Amino acid sequence: MTGSAAPDELVDLLDSEVIAIQKVWDSLRSRHQKYHRNYKAFERETQDKFAEIGFVVAITWNEYSVGGVKQEGAMPTIEVSSRCAPKLFDRDQMVREVTDNILDLPGQAKGDVIRTDQGDAFKQFREAAGNAKPHSHGDDEPFDGHSHGPGGHSH
């Protein structure tokens, strides 16, 4: 990923960046959660802290009401919208970080093979589990896992 992301495009994050983002968020939350806010000052501080770790953020304020009565205060939603400088996403670094389990995910030993599937996901997908509905493949035979081209079945 390079440059800034399009509005609906996700920014690829390394696990180490997730940790850095969490540290910034924890710091901001501990400083501001119990006090009346100067929203503009909070936004500037938030943007500065995220810029220090290389990210541009968008902040929106979510106001709330109780029983139809608007309450004082608001909760921020902070979204990483892009990187400060163009940077290619380093997939090799991501593999190292995931394999080393730097996020300390449960059930994943450090240096172990990356465990992403316990074997059922592909089987369930092929059996049309969940909300998928069975469908015909043109000659009333069940799907056998082979691809179909524009000219019909290709077995």
Image (cartoon, helix red, strand yellow):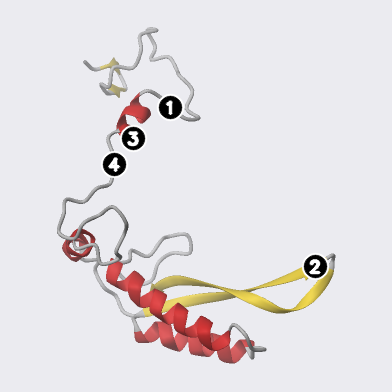
Which residue matches tag 2?
66
Residue 134 horizontal side relative to residue 70, left or right: left
**Which quadrant is home to the N terminus?**
bottom left
Total of numbered circles in the picture? 4
Q: Earlier in the sequence, mark 2 or mark 1?
A: 2
Q: Earlier in the sequence, mark 2 or mark 3?
A: 2
Which element carries disc 4, helix, strand or loop? loop
Which residue matches tag 4?
117
Q: CA distance from mark 3 to mark 1?
A: 9 Å
Q: Position of residue 61 (x, y in %)?
A: 63, 75
**Relative to 131, residue 39 above or below:** below
Q: In percent of the image, x 59 and y 82: which residue is there?
A: 33
Q: In this view, which residue lies farthest toward the right?
A: 68
The label shown at residue 129 is 1
Amino acid at dot 3 = Ala
**Which quadrant is home to the C terminus?**
top left
Do labels 4 and 3 touch, CB within 8 Å? Answer: yes
Q: Quadrant of residue 18?
A: bottom left
